[in-house]
Structure formats: structure tokens, C-alpha cells
Image: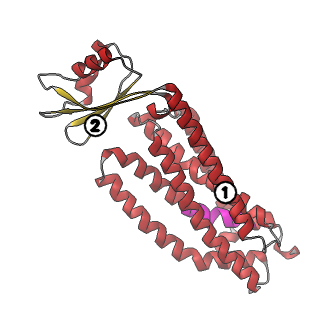
Amino acid sequence: MFIIRNKKIFITISVILVIVSIGLISIFGLRPGIDFKGGALLQVAYEGARPSVEEIQPHLVTAQIGEVFIQPYGEKEFILKSRELTDIERTNLISAVSINGNTATLVSFTSIGPSVGHELTKKAVTSIILVSLAIVLFIAYAFRKVSEPVASWKYGLIAIGTLLHDVIIPTGVFAVISHIYGTEIDTLFVVAILTILGLSISDTIVVFDRIRENLKNKKYNTFEEAVGQSINQTFTRSINTSLTVIIVLLALVFFGPSSTRVFAMMLTAGMFFGTYSSIFLASPLLVLVAGDPKNK
């Protein structure tokens, strides 16, 4: 009952975190990658030791291509991202990154036009909206027989509210990472968001389902008491499950390939705040929506 008694404190913490995250996103912004704005992606490899990014940067000016994002990949490779390139510009770019007699060899080249990027953006937004709508409808249906003191559709809306919380905060974290390391939004970012939605809602539904069972069996005198005891009954399970996943994700962050590091960091933040919201936000919001338990 500690969480329910202090529900306004935990809800306030969540609101502050969301506001701070929105502020970080507004200040630093989110840099769309070539998956969404179009451009060219080159993977180059070196026979000898790979030069540092600082050594390459001055030579890129001679290629006259504009901004080029350089990302180390593996031990001897770079991922280069830029605007769309002609064949001559692509050759010039490879020559520019071949320095000090250390020749860069083109491993792969991908070009994505602006129209394709626009289509991917549209599909990404649509998929997130459809997933959110499906969650509301599913929860409203699953909880249709639990209408007092909170209507079933309100369970769905509260779940969506917590999902927004779970997505906005990791996105704020990503905005900081993007500002520091120049990381761009790509398809892995969208996959991370959708994965966070799935992981978070599964935890929330576990708690909600226990609340439904306790209300159905009429074990407790008030709605507030039923919610509080439901949290106590699922608390250990939620924490243990989340910790197990977070440990695996942290292993990917520190020991995994650089190409999936940001993805793993996003999921780690999403898993942490998703667990927090399921316990400290979603259930307290139910009690807040229900009103004074003495009148129920």
C-alpha cells in the first residue's frame, strides 16, 4: 500500500521525467538517418590499422560532398553516411578516406532516395499508431467485465499514457546520445520503440490482470486496497523479470557490436522506465481516476 498511499509523489516524478525528456528532445533534436531522409551509406574496410575519425575529417573537405557521418564498425571498418552521391562523388569519398597509404576498400554501398525515406517515415509512424490503438482495444475488451469503479476503456487509456511515458523518456536519452556521438535515427530506432511498447505493456497487463482478478473475487473492501495488494503480489515477479532482461541488454551495450549498442541502450532505458511505470504510474493512475475509495 506504500505505493498507492504515495501515488501523487510517484506520478509527479513521472511527469517531471517526461517534461525533462521533452525538453532534451527540443534542445538537442533528433537527427534522421538516411533511412528516413534519403542518402548514401558506404561501408569501407582497411587492410592496415584503421585511422581515427579525427585523422579522416580534414581529408573529407577535399571530397566536397558536405557533411559525412563517420561511424567505426568492427576493428578495421567505417560506416560512412552522406547525401545522395554520384559515381564520381562516391569514388572521391573513398579516395578521401584513404590516407597515409592506407587504402580504403568499398565493402558495400546503399543509396536510398528521398521518396523511399518518406515512405519509411510514414510506415514507421503508422505502425506505432496502429500498435497503440490495438493495445487500447485489447485492454478494453479484456477488462470489459470490470467496469466499477473504473470503466474498462479507461484501463486502455491509462496503459497508453504509461506507454507514452516509456517511449518519451528513452527518446530523451537518445537525444542526448545523438548530440554527444552524432547518432542518427534509423530503422533500429523504430524497432527499439516498438519493442519497448511490447515489453512495457506486457508488464502493465500483468498488474492490471491481477487487479481484475482481485476485483472479481471481491477479496478487498476498497478499490484502493485491491490495487495496492495487486502491486504487492506482482512486484517481485516484475522486478525479477525486468532485471533479467536488463542484465542481458547491458551485456550487449558493453560487449556487443557497436552497430547495436545504441539499440541496446534504448531498450535498457525502456525496460527500466517501463517497469517503473507499470508499478509506480499505471496503478496509481487507476486509483486517481477511480476517485475517493470511501465513496466506492
Disc 2 vs disc 1: which is toward the camera?
1
Residue to which mark 1 is pinned: 134
Residue 213 placement: quadrant: bottom right
Q: CA distance from mark 2 to mark 1?
A: 39 Å
Q: Nearer the viewer, residue 228 or 244?
A: 244
Magenta run includes residue 106: no
Q: Residue at x 67, y 63 (%)?
A: 282
Label 2 is placed on what type of residue? Pro
Q: Residue at x 73, y 57 (%)?
A: 157
The residue stretch that appears in magenta: 275-286
Q: Quadrant of the N terminus?
A: bottom right
Asked whether the beta carbons under mark 2 and mark 1 sit within 8 Å of each other, the answer is no
Q: Quadrant of the C terminus?
A: bottom right
Element at badge 1? helix
The answer to whether residue 194 shows anywhere in this view is: yes
Q: Neighbour class for label 2 at 10 Å: few (<14), some, many (≥20)?
A: some
Residue to which mark 2 is pinned: 72
